[in-house]
Image (cartoon, rainbow, N blue to C red):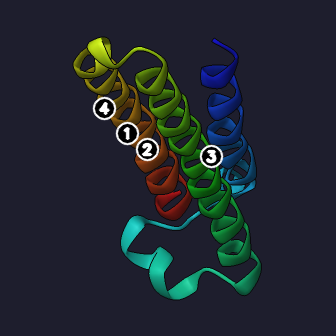
Amino acid sequence: MFRFVFAAVFVMGGFLFCSPTFAQEGLGFADMLGQVGEDGWKLKAVGAGLAVIGAGIGIGRIGGAACESIARQPEVGGQVQGAGIIFAALIEGAAFAAILLCLVF
């Protein structure tokens, strides 16, 4: 449970750093690519970077724990591998959502 919370905190950190861009007014999606100042892009890059770092840490911890678990009990390797893939996909989805929110808004 701690590992999931640890990964979720980093993903939410990505959401936190892209929140100042929500305060902008008057820019549509098509205008954002050409009219956002350097500070807006810097905040977006920091938020997206934190989301990627959080996802990398979370998936790395899942992989490490799965390898350790399979090494201790090889007979449950298939079940551990399947659960690890599911958890990694959930973390990837949260990271992609954070990155998209940072870059779009």
**Towards the viewer: 11 or 36:** 11
**What residue did someone put label 4 on?**
85
**Nearest to N terminus: mark 3 or mark 2:** 3
| Residue at the spot 63% in from the left edge and 30% down from the top edge | 8
Q: Residues within 10 Å of mark 3 (few under 14, many from 20)?
A: some
**Towards the viewer: 15 or 84:** 84
Q: CA distance from mark 2 to mark 4?
A: 18 Å
The residue mark sitting in front, 2 or 4, is 4
**What residue did someone put label 2 on?**
97
The residue mark sitting in front, 1 or 4, is 4
Determine whether the residue tagged by mark 4 lies in a helix, strand or loop.
helix
| Image quadrant assignment for residue 90 | top left
Q: Give amino acid for label 1.
A: Gly
Determine whether the residue tagged by mark 1 lies in a helix, strand or loop.
helix
**What residue did someone put label 1 on?**
93
C-beta proximity under 8 Å, tags 2 and 1: yes
**Nearest to N terminus: mark 3 or mark 1:** 3
Q: CA distance from mark 2 to mark 1?
A: 6 Å
> Residue 97 at x, y = what percent?
43, 44
**What residue did someone put label 3 on?**
57
Q: Give amino acid for label 4.
A: Ile
C-beta proximity under 8 Å, tags 3 and 1: no
The residue mark sitting in front, 2 or 1, is 1
Judge left or right: residue 87 versus residue 9: left
Q: Is residue 87 above or below residue 27?
A: above
The quadrant of the image that shows the N terminus is top right
Q: Is residue 78 above or below residue 8?
A: above
**Nearest to N terminus: mark 4 or mark 3:** 3
